Image: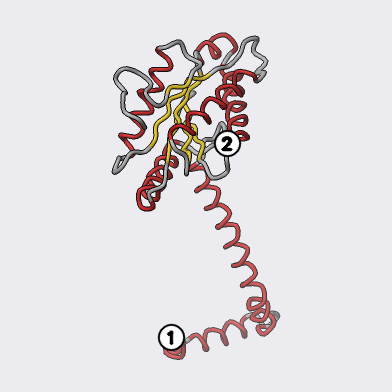
Amino acid sequence: MIFYVVSRLDLSEKLYAFSRAYEVIDLDDMLFSLGLFLPIYIAIFAVRRFGELTILVRESSTDSLTGLVNHRRIQALLAQEISRAQRFQRPLSVILFDIDNFKQVNDSHGHPVGDAVLRQVASLMTAAVREVDFLARTGGEEFMLVATETDGALAQEVAERLRKILCEAEFGIGRPVTASFGVSQLRTKETASALLQRADERLYWSKREGRNRVSGLAAGPADSNNG
C-alpha cells in the first residue's frame, strides 16, 4: 500500500527534486530530525490535549464557586447509587439542606461576602462527611448529600451533626450561619425524583417550623411513613 501511494504521487521524484533544489539542506539530516523529534512533538501535543480535556470534564461536573460536585453531576451519581442500592438491597439516603436567610447575607454584606460564606460552608461540610458520600451544591445556597450505605435514622443523625457544625462556626459576619435540613431514605423500587421530592418536602417542613432544624422520619402530619 505504501509503495502504491509513493508511486502514484511520485514522491521519490519530488523528494529528489527538492533535494537538488536545496542542496544546502542535508536531506538525510532533515529526515533524521523529523523522525527523532516529530514523535516528541506529537507526544507533547497529546499530553496537552489530554490535560485540556480533563479540565473541561472537571469544569462541566464541578461548581466553580465551591469546588463541589454540581447539580448535573450529582443527579447522575444519585441515579448510579440508586441502581446499586436496589440491586444489592443496600440502604441509601439523601440529605437536602440550604442556608437560612441567605439573601440577608448578600443584602447586608454584599455578594463577595455571600460567596465567601458559601465556600466556607462547602469546606466545613466536606471535612465533616465521609469520602464514600457525595456532596454537591445544587444551586444558590442549596446543597445535597448522597449518603451511601446509610439508612434514614443514621442520615438524620448525620444531618444533625452537620447542622451543629454550621451553628458553631465563625463566619465573620456578626451572626451565626444556620441551615435547614430534609432527610429521606430510598424505598423499595423508588425513583430518584420521588426520593428527592420527599427530602424536599421535609426541608420545607424544617423551614416552616422555624429553620435551623432537621426533618426526617415522620417529619410532619402528611409524612407518616418511614423513610
Instruction: Using a 10 Å C-alpha cutoff, classify the residue at mark 2 as few (fewer than 14 neighbours), some (14 to 19) or many (20 or more).
Output: some
Q: Between residues 212 and 89, which one lies in front from this camera angle?
A: 89
Q: Amino acid at mark 2?
A: Val
Residue at 53 percent across and 25 percent down: it is: 160
Question: In which quadrant of the rendered image does the C terminus lie?
Answer: top left
> Which amino acid type is marked by label 1?
Val
Q: Secondary structure at mark 1?
A: helix
| In the image, residue 68 above or below residue 115 | below
Residue at mark 2: 129
Where 50 falls versus 137 (above or below)? below
Instruction: Give the camera-side residue of 163 and 155.
Output: 155
Query: Residue 112's x, y, as percent?
Result: 60, 20
Q: Comparing marks 2 and 1, which lies closer to the viewer?
A: 2
Instruction: Left or right? Give the position of 168 relative to 135.
Output: right
Q: Which mark is residue 200?
A: none
Q: Which residue position is annotated with label 1?
A: 5
Q: Residue at x 42, y 88 (%)?
A: 1
Residue found 39% across the figure and 52% down from its top: 88
Q: Earlier in the sequence, mark 2 or mark 1?
A: 1
Q: Whole-percent x and y of residue 14?
A: 52, 84
- Asked whether, in this view, residue 112 is left or right of residue 182, the answer is right
Say which of 68 and 4 sits in front: 68
